Amino acid sequence: MQRPDLATLACVNADCQHYGRLGQGNLTIRKVYGQDGIRLLRCQSCHEEFSERRHTALFNTEESYQAGDYWDHTAIAPDSKLMVSLVVGKRTQEQTQALVRDTQSRLQKGHLPVLLSDGYEGYESSILEAFGRRYAAPKSGFAGRPRLDILRWPQGLAYGQVIKSSKEQARDGIHLKVIRGKAQLLHTLSLLGYEKINTSSVERQNGTSRLHNQRKVRKTLAFSKSHLYHGWMSWLSVVQYNFCRAHSSLRIKDERGFHHRTPAMASGLTGRIWLTREWLLSPILGG
């Protein structure tokens, strides 16, 4: 395997003056180890020694595994098609809370989004916990333990659900429910070109994910036999989707013709389409 040029790597020591700075000429090869010929690098400025795979997706990937099946809990921005968050695991209240908390942490501070989901009962309480505003409860005037803070929905947050009926419950098939912020919800739906509440972006991405990740294809022998490897492949698929694959609905046209864009480009996270090898070998610094 061809090794990345030292000019494309940087010192990973946060206290070093060359931390995160490419092409400074401060890195040398200390030794080569392992069957893959991985290089141990040394920074001449701070004398830190580290693997060239440190902070990359390939670092320290030998782990034990377990058998089982998982859900991929996903959050996607329907305008840019960007996969904002992924939590792999069984569909439980804890996993739902983890998804909503992670999504909230990736948004601009103080931003209150319009949220659309299916009718799973765990979403409403998880969204309130992550985005809600806490207020001190009024004093009762009696002795004893103080009352718990009051958690309220913030003004500006909108949330709607698409509730699908099972075959046993089938009446009209689908029920649309506005949980909070009807006016804001309708305004955002009109901006997206939607006539009603829907989760089409997630549903479409689920199909794309199965196409790119054969472990998710139904009724085949390609299913995952390990939680660990399933999670790794799910993240690999997500990052490729965000940064390495152009999305047909995101292309733009000018006088020179069509320009293809990835979800990350549409979100302003990058200005180009990445190669898979490129991001696998790119260290994550400061994250």
Image (tube, rainbow, N blue to C red):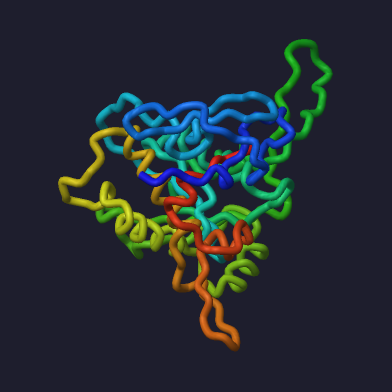
Q: Quadrant location of residue 77?
A: bottom right
Observer-nearest residue: 129 or 38? 38
The quadrant the N terminus occupies is top left
Residue 33 position in % (x across, y down): 40, 27
Query: In the displayed image of the protein, which residue is found farthest to the top?
Result: 144
Observer-nearest residue: 206 or 143? 206
Q: Is residue 145 visible?
A: yes
Is 67 placed left or right of 92 in the picture? left
Which residue is located at x 55 percent, y 75 percent? 193
Residue 153 position in % (x across, y down): 68, 45
Count of picture labels: 0
Say if 31 sits above or below 255 in the image. above
Which residue is located at x 49 percent, y 53 percent? 117
Is 189 placed left or right of 224 in the picture? right
Residue 242 position in % (x across, y down): 49, 56
Q: Quadrant location of residue 234?
A: top left
The quadrant the C terminus occupies is top right
Say if 220 sits above or below 171 in the image. above
Say if 126 sits above or below 163 in the image. above
Residue 266 position in % (x across, y down): 58, 65
Observer-nearest residue: 147 or 224? 224
Which residue is located at x 57 percent, y 25 percent? 49
Query: In the displayed image of the protein, which residue is found farthest to the bottom?
Result: 255
Q: Is residue 162 visible?
A: no
Say if 192 sits above or below 53 in the image. below
Is 194 placed left or right of 235 in the picture? right
